[in-house]
Image (cartoon, rainbow, N blue to C red):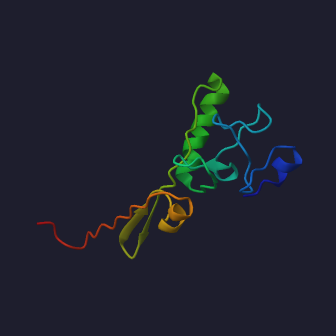
Amino acid sequence: PNVELAGKAGLQIGKTGAIAVNQYLQTSAPDIYAVGDCMENWDVITGSKRRHQLATNAIRTGYIAGKNVVLGNRLAYEGTAMPFITKVFGHQIGAVGFTEREAQERGLDVVSVTVDTLRLSY
């Protein structure tokens, strides 16, 4: 993400190259909030820092930060399960969470499910 201005302003940049935030989406300068693509996100399962650059995340974090600015840090952001969905050749494909490889690298038990919707249900 483009965080050059944030870095020049003295905001902490996280390990992922995005702006570090707390659970209320405040940066290292408490009166400045970061959301969406420029914020450092975290996984809800492991707490590991990640980037989640999707519109759904930008909308959600923008809503939370806006509420917190107006009402005073009442709404905590819990992180992301990294969901995504896309359409390829007329088929919708979606996933949530780590890939099998990522889960294994983190020492997590792996469950992988494939749903084939091309066959009729009987």
Q: Which residue occupies 64% across, 34% down?
A: 24
Say left or right for 60 vs 40.
Answer: left
The quadrant holding residue 9 is top right
- Residue occupying the far top of the picture: 71
Say left or right for 72 vs 97.
Answer: right
| Image quadrant containing the C terminus | bottom left
Q: Is residue 80 above or below residue 94?
A: above
| Image quadrant containing the N terminus | bottom right
Residue 77 versus residue 106: which sits nearer the camera? 106
Residue 5 versus residue 110: which sits nearer the camera? 110
Task: Give how far across and how far down residue 27 sits, in percent.
Answer: 75, 39
- Residue occupying the far front of the picture: 107
- Residue occupying the far bottom of the picture: 89
Task: Give how far across and how far down residue 79 sits, in percent.
Answer: 56, 44
Residue 21 versus residue 98: which sits nearer the camera? 98
Q: Which residue occupies 26% across, 69% down?
A: 117
Residue 49 versus residue 3: which sits nearer the camera? 49
The quadrant holding residue 54 is bottom right
Looking at the rendered structure, the number of numbered marks drawn on it comes to 0
Q: Which residue occupies 55% across, 43% down?
A: 60
Q: Which residue occupies 51% across, 48% down?
A: 45
